[in-house]
Amino acid sequence: MWMWIVEYEDFVVVSLNGNDKNSTIVGNFYRSPSSSAEANDRLLSVIDTLCSNYKCPKIFLGDINFPNIDGRYLPVRTAKVKKL
């Protein structure tokens, strides 16, 4: 069970439990296109906390709305993807 206080509200995180050592964390995040720098820092803090405190595999998705990201030029390497 997770119990931590954050000042960012637009996210949901669940843990999909396999056997004792095979859990996966799934996080869904929303960032408004007009988010302030402080809100961006809070969002990144949530993601950093999840990555730092939970060593299991993670899947993060959502509507992030960062204006300078161009998905056409972000390569995806499928050779390292593990089947669940």
Image (cartoon, helix red, strand yellow):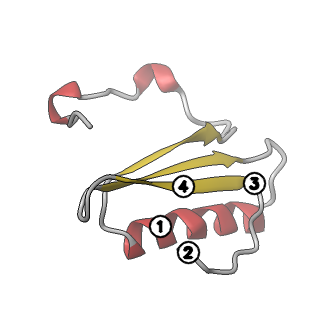
Q: Label 3 amino acid?
A: Asp
Q: Which residue is the extreme one toward the front? A: 19
The residue to which callout 1 is attached is 50
- Give the CA separation, mark 2 to mark 4: 10 Å
Name the element at disc 3: loop
The residue to which callout 4 is attached is 14
Name the element at disc 4: strand
The residue to which callout 2 is attached is 2
- Give the CA separation, mark 2 to mark 1: 10 Å
Closer to us: 30 or 18: 18
Residue 21 quadrant:
bottom left
In the image, which disc is placed on residue 10?
3
- Give the CA separation, mark 4 to mark 3: 14 Å
Q: Residues within 10 Å of mark 3 (few under 14, many from 20)?
A: few
Q: Please report the residue visible at 23 percent of the width from the left and 29 percent of the height from the top.
A: 77
Q: Label 4 amino acid?
A: Val
Residue 5 quadrant:
bottom right
Q: Quadrant of the C terminus?
A: top left
Q: Position of residue 28 (x, y in %)?
A: 60, 46
Q: Please report the residue visible at 76 percent of the width from the left and 73 percent of the height from the top.
A: 7
Name the element at disc 1: helix
Q: Please report the residue visible at 52 percent of the width from the left and 62 percent of the height from the top.
A: 47
Query: Horizontally, is 68 left or right of 32 in the view?
Result: left
Closer to us: 35 or 54: 54
Q: Position of residue 27 (x, y in %)?
A: 55, 50
Residue 10 sits above or below residue 71 on the image: below
- Give the CA separation, mark 3 to mark 2: 17 Å
